[in-house]
Amino acid sequence: MENLRNVRNIGISAHIDSGKTTLTERMLYYTGRTHVIKEVKGEGAVMDHMELEKERGITITSAATTVQWQDKKVNIIDTPGHVDFTVEVERSLRVLDGAVLVLCAVAGVQSQSITVDRQMKRYAVPRIAFINKMDRTGANPVNVIQQLESKLGLTAIPLQLPIGAESNFAGIIDLIERKAIYFDGDNGEDIRLEPIPADMVDAADRARQGMLEALSMVSDEVMELLLEEAEVSTDLIHKTIREGTIAQQICPVMVGSAYRNKGVQPLLDAVNRYLPSPLDREVFAKDNNNGMAEVPLASDPDAPLVAMAFKLVEESFGQVTYMRIYQGTLKKGTFYFNSRQKKRARISRILRVHADQKEDIDAAGAGDIVAVMGVECATGDTYCEEGANLSLESIYAAEPVIDLS
Ligand code: GDP
């Protein structure tokens, strides 16, 4: 069974038009690049437009898409950018372990950014902010960072400095690794690493110091090293950012231009490094057989199954139910008990949906998100072992809805 440490269940949320769709497509593109890159007359790689079109369709219709980035399996879950708290939005949000909040470098924090951020806070979903459209005239990341603090109350910690501005936006300075990353080529997909350019060394040093001082607020270890004027190791910086992000004490900020393929790969690295795995989150179910007592769920694959249907979708290959497995292992051909309908159902097929294919699998373990065929249910329904009678839906439904006005 899968090592859960290597699983990420993430959502990408944004105010409309900030580039959520473009960014999602680029993520699919980079994670599946062996399928979609072709060489053109020795001039480097370009994107195959047919493939891009195919991916576009998949991005829009799939409630969850599984991609592989380095050693991590990343489930990208479609999070509707609704203005209000609909039950549908809530169900999508509660299956996330982390999220990327996409912002426009010109427009900054907009009304829906505020809404989705409140929703994320309500479900305690840690976030990374991605300031997109750095190539646009009027791009002002400093302004957006201030708005993250003033409008969303986040402790925003920039991990990068942009190199060049607007149409000359060429790359980023990675403040942790202390190097410049340029995104070259027509599609911006050729990554070139260089030392920090001489005219930016001072600014990079100041920005790195600012980043470390901000991190010292959430880590005594970093604080002590700064007081001693000692070197803070890269490993300690990554660890501090990860822990601070998961605890929602900080929000790392990255910059880029999804449209120009700039900054997407560092963002994928950050998803792997800083967003939580299913093991980092505690989930409880209510036991309907025992006075609705709270039962902590274990990620152990041998524990009794508990899974929630969070989305029903008509896909090109038929009607499917997307489920998140919270405990145990979901097995094909097995009967499970739907605790709302009070009846059993047999899982006839389990599918993993990738950007360019769907894969039939026999079983999926805790922490995973899969598409299931053969069950008729409603979103929010919990499936558990026969004999058990657990439900996940009631946990959040009992909470008061936050006033958005
Ligand atoms: P969504 O509504 O958040 O899903 O946004 P889309 O991905 O549909 O993007 C909205 C518009 O912004 C489209 O016309 C995109 O081509 C454009 N766009 C997306 N990313 C960038 C970017 O990095 N730079 C620029 N200049 N335009 C972008």
Image (spheres, rainbow, N blue to C red):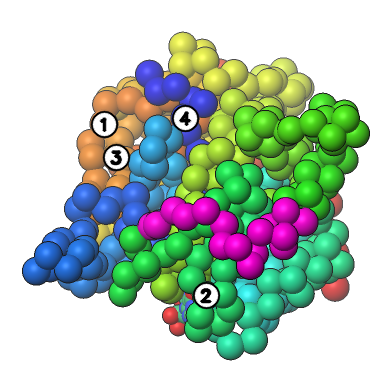
Between the residue at mark 4 and the residue at mark 3, the CA separation in whole angstroms equals 19 Å
Question: Of 140 and 365, which appears nearest the observer?
Answer: 140
Q: Where does the image place residue 78, in percent across and percent down from the top left?
A: 48, 57
Who's the residue at 27% across and 53% down the image?
Answer: 33
Residue 281 in view: no
Which is more N-terminal, label 3 or label 4? 4
Between the residue at mark 1 and the residue at mark 2, the CA separation in whole angstroms equals 43 Å
Label 3 near label 4: C-beta < 8 Å? no
Between the residue at mark 2 and the residue at mark 4, the CA separation in whole angstroms equals 33 Å
Between the residue at mark 1 and the residue at mark 3, the CA separation in whole angstroms equals 6 Å
Residue 326 part of the magenta-drawn span: no
Question: Which residue is under mark 1?
Answer: 361
Question: Which residue is under mark 2?
Answer: 169
Q: Where does the image place residue 124, in percent across and percent down from the top left?
A: 73, 44
Q: Where does the image place residue 364, in percent across and percent down from the top left?
A: 37, 27
Question: Which residue is under mark 3?
Answer: 351
Disc 3 is placed on an element classified as strand
Who's the residue at 75% across and 66% down the image?
Answer: 145
Label 1 CB-ligand 1 distance < 8 A? no
Q: Is residue 17 above or below residue 30?
A: below
Label 2 near label 1: C-beta < 8 Å? no
Residue 194 in view: yes
Q: Amino acid at mark 1?
A: Ile
Between the residue at mark 1 and the residue at mark 4, the CA separation in whole angstroms equals 19 Å
Q: Where does the image place residue 261, in percent across and percent down from the top left?
A: 41, 67
Identify the magenta region. Answer: 191-207
Between the residue at mark 2 and the residue at mark 3, the CA separation in whole angstroms equals 41 Å
Q: Amino acid at mark 3?
A: Leu
Which is more N-terminal, label 2 or label 1? 2
